[in-house]
Amino acid sequence: MASQQPYYNASNSGSSPPVVQGVLVNNPNDDNANNDHVGHTYDHKHANHGVGAMEISSLPPHQSPLTPSTDEGNWTRGSVQPKRCNDFLFAFLFYVNLGVMAWVAAVFAPKMIGEVAESAAAGGGGGRERGLLDEEEVVADGYSDESSVDDATVGVKFASWMVRTMHPVLSTVSSSVYQFNNNDIHDRDLEENDNVTGTNDMSDMMLLLGISALIALVISSGVLSFMIRHAESLIKFALLFNIASAAVFAIGSLFLSPFAAIIGIGFCGLTIYYAYVVWGRIPFAACNLISATTAVRANFGLAFFAYNSLFIMIGWSMWWLLSFTSVVYITSGCDGQGNCEKDPSGWLIFALLLSYYWTFQVIKNVVHVTVAGTVGTWWFVPTEGSSCCSHGVRDSFLRSVTTSFGSICMGSLLVAIIETAKTMVRNLRESEGGGIFLCLAECLLACLQDIMEYFNMWAFVFVGLYGYPYVESGKNVINLFKTRGWTTIITDNLAQSVLTMVSVAVGLITGLVALGIAHGQRMVFGDELGGMAAAFFIGFIIGFVLTSTLMTLVSSAVNTVIVCYAEAPREFEENHPKLSQEMQSAWRQAWPTEFQY
């Protein structure tokens, strides 16, 4: 084949080479073609070409390539799956969800905005203080006097809060638009306030936002190299920082109450004990972090999809907020002043919340699956996954939004249902002033959500690597870690503490830069002290969010590295020998019993 490229020559090895979502073909240039050990090339143009799956043809599928004589149970190594749309029903339902929300926004939002605008133009904005929005007619639990707590529908308080929150915003916006159209907006002279000097216009605000974002992007991109060189030191610093923070909390709690002091001292003691227990595992976490960060930096095009998902989430939140408010406004019989004739349906609130959480989870998990596929390509076929816009990045993203999209929607829906139920229970608990059973139910749902998110985190790695359906991916990854004896290893999250600390650090730097810019440009937001705090807060939030978005790539890559190392340590040694040597040493030191390579 003219399109073949060399991948793995097995002429001197004791087993046949792995297949990485491609086919193995004879190498006509191999001098040992007639021997038992035949050289091969990797056909990267094959129809099934993609990420990560491999087969060891000379070994039984349940045996490790490094220990072929040892029976390792019923675990079967991952292999490439046929190209098909897995879990298609859930992908279809997700698109129906988006279609319904688009229809809701198109039908209800214009009517609501029009009525609110007419009310604002007619000077009826004061009506926001009547009816459902009248604080004198709303009891402490958030319901009107006409409806007792026992008869209240679950979720009404949440909807009422949304209407009360959005109505002043819509009234203000609509009033501003009306006044602008009639040339009634006048410039405000900030210097009338003795405490305010300087300028505060939209151009200055955009300058502050733009420079803060640019600085955050530059610093967060450069911090990847810093993490590779100083991963172990960063993990140690993160642990010591946690101890210092817990100590400060404990000291502060001494001045509050004896009960708070006990909690503070206990928390500090647990933090110190945790650092003592995991200190020996720092090299292990550092090697995982270095390998994952190296893979992300080699395929930095992943950052485009991460930041793009951030903007999509923001856009979806605005779209959903408008749809939610408008459908509650219309179905509850509200008028332009915010007076509503009836309470919204609890089932309607549940469906709208489910739509939001489901879409949010899907957007996040698409990025996770894309990273898993890309790191798999870097692991097995580095020539296909070692550039900014590599085939690995593009192909992994395409698979995540096509053949694997149904699996992503299925796993995301399970988490979204639990999260929605937790939100409804919390609103009901707050409306009824507490209650032990509702409190226990909320805690149970929160724990169940954490378990499902943790399960998804590993299952979606297999989805990205091999293209398995969702349920099968979950079973395979659990069997893999159970067979390896690595159920304890995957509970280590030392790397995550570093990623959080780095995000906070970049946020602080960006906040200080924003503060300097605001001071130099004489930007103000209220009085002088308030303006300084606002500028710092804006810069901190931008820096923290953008860096956290980039760090999610590293977090997903760390999980993928653990799975790939459990599946295929030999391929890692062949393609990344230096990293493999460091990984073996660190893992053997941290987990001498579990790690037997």
Image (cartoon, rainbow, N blue to C red):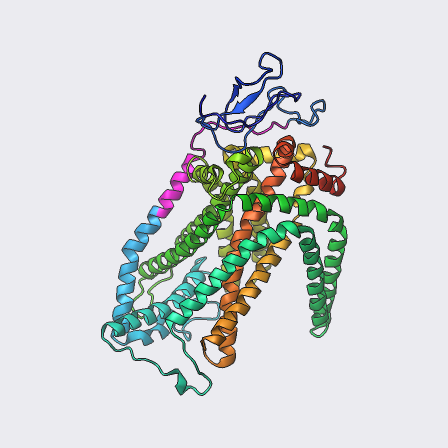
Quarter holding residue 75: top right
Left or right? Give the position of 399 relative to 493.
left
Q: Residue at x 72, y 58 (%)?
A: 271
138 left or right, relative to 441: left
Residue plotted at (73% across, 62% down) = 268
Residue 538 rendering spot, x and y as whole percentages = 49, 67
Residue 269 lies in what quarter of the image?
A: bottom right
Q: Nearer the viewer, residue 253 or 491?
A: 491
Residue shown at the point (43%, 30%) measured from the top left: 84
What segment is highlighted magenta in the picture? 75-98
For the C terminus, give its image quadrant.
top right
Q: Residue 576, image x and y in percent?
A: 62, 36
Question: Is residue 282 something one can see in this rendering?
Answer: yes
> Along the line of sight, which residue is nearer the eye, 266 or 249?
249
x, y percentage for residue 574?
A: 63, 31
Figure check: 529 above or below 248: below
Q: Position of residue 179 (x, y in %)?
A: 26, 74
In this rendered view, identify the residue nearer to me: 195 or 204.
204
Q: Quadrant of residue 548?
A: bottom right
Give the residue at x 41% y 70%: 205
Q: Tell me if residue 65 comes above or below residue 218 in the rendering.
A: above
